[in-house]
Image: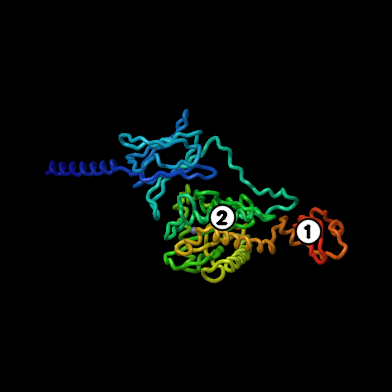
Amino acid sequence: MGFELLKKLVTLITIVVCFSGIHLLHAADISGIRFWQDPEKTRLVFDVSEKVSYKLFTLDDPYRLVVDIEQGNLNTDVAKIEIPNSLVKKIRTSAQADKLRVVLDLENGVTTKDFTLKPFQEYGHRLVVDLRDKNAKKVAIKTADSTLKGKERDIIIAIDAGHGGEDPGAIGPKGTREKNVTLEVAQRLAKLIDAEKGMKAFLTRGSDYYVGLEKRTRLARENKADLFVSLHADGFTDSRVRGASVWVLSSRGANSEMGKWLEQREKSSDLLGGVESLSNKDPLVAQVLLDLSMHYSVGASIKAAELVRQELSQNMSKMHGRGLRKAAFMVLRMPDIPAMLVEMAFISNPNEEKLLKTAKQQRKVAKAILSGVKSYFRTHPPDGSLYAKLAKSKSYRVKSGDTLSEIAHTFGVSTSELKSHNNLKSTQLRVGQTLSIPGV
Ligand SMILES: [Zn+2]
């Protein structure tokens, strides 16, 4: 009997070992390899059929990055992969007995960071490797040249194109991706703002790559933004839903179905986008809701957002819902910067999807936002800005016999200053014309 039991036990162990052996031998299919380029790093993403075991190392002379994926089975054509920059010269693979070896030939040495992502929405398992060029100069933050252009500093508007890179955002019935539309409108808006005297735009992302939600707010702060405008065109389950809306932060969370839906979508953004870690929350952001200054920025946000909403409602065919909308968006949690989120339309609505792709509509949205932003700063100019100076301006009605230089002399300003302040092409004046006198 003892022997029989032992035999059974041996058989059982053999079966278990075999099964685990089979499991280990199970191939991990690699169905896609992608690159994303942002100003600081190159991101390499593998679509894999399961959580993979892998090893990663770099080699010098020539510079290479090697990724060994255990039991990896390549199911994609490496020759067709688009390589977005000059750091990565070539990608090649070789199947070895128990692994797939992926080699990147590099221009320079790199530092790497790697992590895996669990399946989420349309994505399955992913392996992500971030490469940073050791020779790259640190990207200097382009803080606005506040000291230039006379004494006044520019008002900085941070424009945040929602989603990007691995995170497409909502996808319209015709396949339009939210991330592309938001970027196009952001770039149009930035151009309009840069053309305005006394204003300068800053984009949280300038092309197709993902920026984490917390990083978006950090970039706005580092760039000393006076206002933060996040652009979206989300989708909803009901394709009939349409119209634009403007959202501000609510510390209590959303009070509408749509708000809850959008909050949920925002949460999924970082999971899709592939942020290195979701655990190291910015402590400042965590504290923010308790902070007194938050009340200031919420109040300011409401004023600015309301003006933008009014402009949109006058210039667009349809708004979704009445008045300002509120939700607990992470991207709007900033203690010191008024912030709003503009849902430009519903990309899930076939008509709005079509419209949003047109240059005409994109320009219309950008212009409406700009008008709202301008009227906000006309009444709430930041100290030291051109808008603050203009707000203090006096006006003077030109009488018969007046000359520009005399008027300038009377108010203690230079003729050229008076001329440029009023956008005059010559020194000729009309009787009855009103001149704005710059404040001192
Ligand atoms: Zn969105």
Q: Extreme top residue here?
A: 61
What is the x, y in percent for residue 228? Answer: 59, 57
- Indicate whether 148 appears above or below 134: below
* Left or right relative to 218: residue 238: left
What numbered label is drawn on residue 438? Answer: 1
The amino acid pointed to by label 2 is Ala
How much space separates mark 2 and mark 1, taking CA atoms? 32 Å
What is the x, y in percent for residue 134? Answer: 53, 35
Q: Are marks 2 and 1 in contact (CB under 8 Å)?
A: no
What numbered label is drawn on residue 12? Answer: none
Q: Quadrant of the C terminus?
A: bottom right
- Under circle 2, the secondary element is helix
- Indicate whether 242 appears above or below 123: below
Residue ID for mark 2: 186
Tell me which residue sits at (85%, 65%) in the image.
399
- State the residue in front, 416 or 87: 416
| Mark toward the start of the polypeptide (2 vs 1) | 2
Number of numbered discs: 2
- Under circle 1, the secondary element is loop
Q: Quadrant of residue 412?
A: bottom right
Q: Quadrant of residue 341?
A: bottom right
The amino acid pointed to by label 1 is Pro
Q: Quadrant of residue 332?
A: bottom right
Tell me which residue sits at (50%, 44%) in the image.
37
Residue 201 in view in this figure: yes
What is the x, y in percent for residue 276? Answer: 47, 47
* Left or right relative to 109: residue 31: left
What is the x, y in percent for residue 405? Answer: 85, 56
Q: What colouring does the structure picture have?
A: rainbow
